[in-house]
Amino acid sequence: MKRRTFLKNFGCTATLSWLGCPALGSAAASIAPGTTAEHTVLSCNIRVALPEDEATGNSWASRRQLCIDVIRAQKPDLVCLQEVIREQMVDLEAAFPTFASFGFDGPEMDGHLTGYHGIAKNPILYSRERYEFISAGGFWLSEAPHLPGSLSWESARARHVNWLRLRERSSRRQFRILNTHLDHVSQRAREEQVKMILAEAALYTPDFPQLLAGDFNADATNPVLKLALDAGWINTHQVAPGPRDDGRTVHSFMGEQYRPKTEAGRKRGAIDFILTRGPIATLSWKILRDSRDGRYPSDHYFVAAKVVFNP
């Protein structure tokens, strides 16, 4: 998608930012000098609460506390969640009272107060003690980005992205974090969806710090990731110091016992990512393989990265 076309179609509403549109030309000036404190970022596909999981002992009720405990143990500052429905959002907000959330509510959710209905969201939790809210928005990854639930490019489900612009209280430094979940069936949809995200993010100056997390339903060898890297994004998994962990993040509630049925599945690496753009350094990256009594918090392992915003 060309930049001019993107601007024409979406303009400042490219993010449905009724909460405030960033001053794109002055983004660099808003980055104040400050400390290089660490920020712990998590990407967590928590597996939507499905009735059929009850038969296997993996219902949300049976793994809810473990999911919360695994997230809490990382002492996160920012948590990007995927596959969240209302009952899960209520539980997570209650479990993290010092965090604010953005990106769950919308007309597509108002019509379904209970159950899945093929709709799950990608909310972001952020520490209110550490960050000040500046603005936020989101758009649907389709040719009609302002219409909730819209689909394009043979996408099996409606997909979208949420973003938050925050200011760290101590350093006064601003940054942006985006959270998404790309389609699980259509390769074309995944590529077009990520192109939309990249085009919108490119409206910010290169020195404005941005983070992009989520379930890409594609590993590092997929053209989807190449599109992001070619656009100037950095994969925290690839640049983190220390021994590389190239394990997969999908495990179907089986942990290390999981064995994909196909050759492609056996070769597939992590599909959950935390990417950075701008003056951000990666200190660490890891897959969280926590379990308790043979039970896992999700059918995905969560991933965590520690980053610093360079002064």
Image (tube, rainbow, N blue to C red):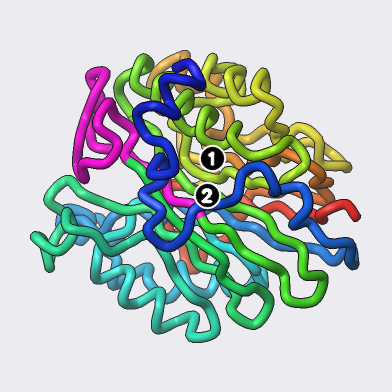
Find residue 262 and report its horizontal and vertical position in percent: 40, 17
Cβ–Cβ under 8 Å for marks 1 and 2: yes
Give the quarter of the figure containing the C terminus.
bottom right
Judge the density around disc 1: few (<14), some (14-19), many (≥20) Cα neighbours within 10 Å.
many
Give the quarter of the figure containing the N terminus.
top left
Judge the density around disc 2: few (<14), some (14-19), many (≥20) Cα neighbours within 10 Å.
many
In the image, is residue 7 above or below residue 192? below
Q: Residue at x 10, y 61 (%)?
A: 112
Q: Earlier in the sequence, mark 1 or mark 2?
A: 1
In the image, is residue 98 above or below residue 308? below
Near-viewer residue (102 or 52): 102
Give, as a three-letter code, the residue at label 2: Tyr
Q: Residue at x 53, y 57 (%)?
A: 164
Near-viewer residue (23 or 305): 23
Report the predominant secondary structure element of the magenta stretch: loop
Label 1, label 2: how far apart the Cα atoms are: 9 Å
Residue ID for mark 2: 301
Is residue 304 on the magenta stretch?
A: no
**For the view shown, which residue lies furthest in the left direction?**
111
Give the secondary structure at mark 2.
loop
Q: Which residues are magenta?
A: 140-163
Please indicate, yes or no, whether residue 84 appears anywhere in the rendered image.
yes
Find residue 274 and report its horizontal and vertical position in percent: 62, 43
In the figure, is residue 143 to the left or right of 200?
Answer: left
Q: Quadrant of residue 126 in the image? A: bottom right
Find residue 39 and report its horizontal and vertical position in percent: 74, 62
Residue ID for mark 1: 272
Q: Residue at x 63, y 35 (%)?
A: 247
In the image, is residue 62 above or below residue 294? below
Give, as a three-letter code, the residue at label 1: Asp
Q: Nearer the viewer, mark 1 or mark 2?
A: 1
Is residue 149 on the magenta stretch?
A: yes
